[in-house]
Every structure is written in C-alpha cells, then in structure tokens.
Amino acid sequence: MSSKSKRVFVTGVAGFLGSHLSEKLVNLGHSVIGVDNMIGGYEDNIPKNIAFHNVDCCDFKKVKSLMKGVDVVYHCAATAHEGLSVFSPYEITKNNYLASVSIFSAAVNEKVKRIVFCSSMARYGEQKAPFTEKMSPLPVDPYAISKVASEEVLKNLCELNGIEWVIAIPHNIIGPRQKYDDPFRNVVSIMINRMLQGKAPIIYGDGNQTRCFSYIDDCISCLIPMLDQNNLNREIINIGPDEEFVTINKIAELCSNITGVNLNPIYKKDRPKEVKHATCSADKARKLLNYKTKVSLKDGIQKTFEYIKKRGIRPFDYNINIEINNELTPSTWKNKEI
C-alpha cells in the first residue's frame, strides 16, 4: 500500500486508545471516520476534524453503511474489563466478540485493504512471562476468550477474502484521556482518582503481581505503521515496553509519590482468574516497527496524574451490571466500595 492519504475507519474514538490514534491519523493527513457508543469514553476525547458517529459496533447495517470507500479499519473499541468478565461474561462477550464480528464482516463486505485489530495481552494467560508472539493463546477468562475468538474470526474472514490483517497486542496503556472513573479497570487511573479524593489505593491479593505499562504515545507510534507498512500483513505484534516489569505494590508507591498522598494500601482478596505475571517481550516490535520506549513508567504516571488533576476528580461509575453475584464476586464491586 502507498503512503498517500487514506480513508480510515476507527472504532472507539471517544475512548483512550481510539481518540489518540484518530488524532494522530488526522494530523498525518488522513481522513478518519470514527464510531463510539459512548459507554467507555468521554465526549471531550473525540478529536476534532474527524467524522464522528454515535454508533454501536454491533449495529452491523449502520457500520457497513459508514465504511463505504474506506481503505483501512482500526478496531480499537472494547469493553476491556478482564477481571469483571468473570462476573459479567454476557456483556463483556457481546461488546467484544460480537462487536468485532460485526466490524470485520462490514469491512470484508466493503472490501477494505487492511484491518488492524487491537487485541489484548490477556490472550497469553498463565504462560511463562515475558510473553512472545510465538506462544499459542491460552485464555483463562471470558474477556481473553472473546479476544482470541475475535482474532480467529478476523484471520478466517480476511484470508478467505484476500484482505490484509494485523493484530496488535497493546498492554496496560496509561496516559491522558484514559477513563479514570471506571471502578473495574485501569489500575493507575483508579489509584490516582482515589488518592486525589484522600482515599487509599486498593490492591487485590498481595500486590506482587507483575505487569508492564505502556505510555499512550509509545503505543500509537507502533499502531501508525500498521496502516500501510507492507511487511506487517498477517503479523501479531506485542506493543509495549519490556524494560520495566513492575509489581502492583510498586505502582501504588509511585502513585503515592507523584500525588503526594501517603496512605497505606487497602488489600483485598485475590480476584478469581487474575494472571499473576503478565509481561511481554518487545523484540518483534523493535525488529518490525523500530519500537523504542520513549516515556518511562514514572513519567507516564506523572502525565496521567496531571491529566486527572486538571480534569477533576470524579465519583466512580458502576455502569456495567454484575451478572454473577456470589461469594467470589469482589466486595469492592458488589458493595460499590471503590
């Protein structure tokens, strides 16, 4: 594909990842059509100079009509609630798997050149970290299952119909525009929003879970070449740093240092199905995308803090119903303790 201006369809443009991606594409001279159902994003995230439509990805007929003449589709929208998916599997599966099938089907029907799907590190499950792209998916919860199933449908439809596909595996992205009043996900933003309200951070388990966190700009720098770089067709690529693997306890400490709020964490029992060590290798991204981590974890948390402080603290919004409410359901969600 050439590097000339393209007509690009992006899902989740009111969300964190989709809004930054759309803004960057417009700044590079591309035309962007964006959709979002406004469940997991903020209206002020929607970039100017894009054609925005308040549409649910599951609305196949509407989505298909909006894709006419589109060159490339980026599917970023997701209900990215891995822990909650154990207790709200229907809603999470509908908003991830069925929405993805709708988007992919519409894209295939309209004969787009390439589909870029933002999957999840959850695909790797409990395998030995750091995860590499050569590992077969071993999902351990409904969210991860929905993502892996979406990957398989994407490959199936694209290979049958001669359409290029790329699967990006971002992980634990932080930065401005991330939804910070969601009690079910985004650990850094939850901690900062609580601390700015004078509340201690909440940690599930012993806090020794290890993760790698990626600043939004570093993630976008990998997604942009996926628009038309020829050697990326049919590639699955981890996106994010592998220099700083960090525990949740350390995250709480960094958030405390940056916010200036020194409160001991509140420890809750482990969440069912939570993967203990989830970190990725960035070797493939370095090779194919010339990936470099430009924003450190500390600086990324600092920028996230500045965004939340400027935008203002918010009460947590329990906008997804818990479908399975039993003794395994975290009390923080069941009793709205966050």
Image (cartoon, rainbow, N blue to C red):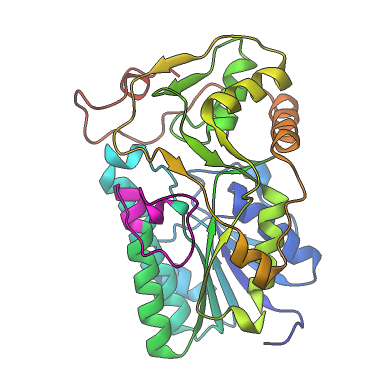
Query: Vertical placement of 99 versus 7: above or below?
Result: above
Task: Residue 276: give x, y in percent of width and height.
Answer: 40, 37
284 or 22: nearer the eye? Answer: 284
121 or 320: nearer the eye? Answer: 121
Query: Vertical placement of 119 versus 294: above or below?
Result: below
Q: What is the magenta range?
A: 122-146
Task: Residue 116: give x, y in percent of width and height.
Answer: 54, 70
**How many numbered marks are there?**
0
Image quadrant where one finds the N terminus: bottom right
Answer whether residue 167 is visible to the viewer in this image: yes
Answer whether residue 313 is visible to the viewer in this image: no
Image quadrant where one finds the C terminus: top left
Q: In the image as oriented, which residue stretches furthest toward the left?
A: 326
- In reply to whether residue 127 is colored magenta, the answer given is yes
Task: Residue 266: give x, y in percent of width and height.
Answer: 46, 13
Residue 253 shown left or right of residue 159 in the figure: right
